[in-house]
Image: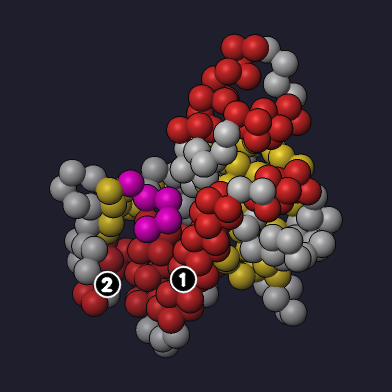
Amino acid sequence: MIIKNKSDYDDYAKLMRRHPEFSPLDDKYIRQLLDEMKVKQYHRGQILFDQGDTRDKFYFLIEGVAKSFHWDKNGDEQLYLYIRPDKGFPYIGLFEDDRYAYTVQTMTDVKIAEFSMPIYEQVLRENPELMVNAVKEMSQIINTSETQLQRMVTTSARCRVANAILFIGQQIGDLQEDDTILIPYPITIVELSKVSGTTRETTSQMVQKLVSENKIQYNRKYFKILELDEDSY
């Protein structure tokens, strides 16, 4: 859907002006992006783009959650990051890559805004403050990925599964008033096994163990992290 209705156009303009990723832009650039922006909806499990596809669009997630991953030389899925609402992607490869470096798949039904990558990159070049925001996002992505790699360098299946739950919670979880973290999206044991690099059976056993130790709650595919101290895992 290309925005044609004036009230929708005005609503999205207000939303962009309030959001940190777009707030540095003046009306000229807001209009430039909105005039060709497309808003689309996808069902759970759909691929937005594949690793190696032409890198022609920049996306902004309005509703739902997605994940980015790449395939290693053995054809195994290697998780990169989860993407929650109000986040843009991809930042990796800006101004340089012709192809997407990873695949993005929806984890829930989602609503997404799509922009032309060349136009988005042009707007970035002409707006230094927006460029700074993009660099900060890239730095955060790199730091999150490096932290996850460090956490997973262990032979303990229990630590790998616990760290994977914490990794997901820190990206797409919501901090509660009692300092626990609720992950408000369904995470299957199979999904968790991919993140932790353990088998489905081992992952299931470790989840049960963490539940029995009152470290987490797991009910109907929803996790709640009760213990936030990483050293306790």
- Magenta segment boundaries in residue numbering: 170-174
User: Is residue 143 or residue 232 the one in the foreground?
Assistant: 143
Residue 67 in view, yes or no: no
Q: Residues within 10 Å of mark 2 (few under 14, many from 20)?
A: few
Q: Answer above or below: position of 156 versus 16.
A: below
Q: Answer above or below: position of 222 versus 213.
A: above
Q: Position of residue 116 (x, y in %)?
A: 76, 42
Q: Residues within 10 Å of mark 1 (few under 14, many from 20)?
A: few
At label 1, the amino acid type is Asn
Q: Residue at x 35, y 77 (%)?
A: 159
Indicate the secondary structure of the residue bearing disc 1.
Answer: helix
Furthest residue in direction bottom, as rendered: 155
At label 2, the amino acid type is Glu
Residue 219 belongs to magenta span: no
Viewer-nearest of labels 2 and 1? 1
Q: What mark, if any, has residue 230 been given in the picture? A: 2
User: Is residue 37 or residue 175 the one in the foreground?
Assistant: 37
Considering the image in quadrants, where does the C terminus appear?
bottom left
Q: What mark, if any, has residue 143 been given in the picture? A: 1
Q: Residue at x 78, y 48 (%)?
A: 118
Q: Is residue 71 left or right of residue 224?
A: right
Residue 224 in view, yes or no: yes
Q: Position of residue 157 (x, y in %)?
A: 40, 79
Q: Position of residue 226 (x, y in %)?
A: 22, 57
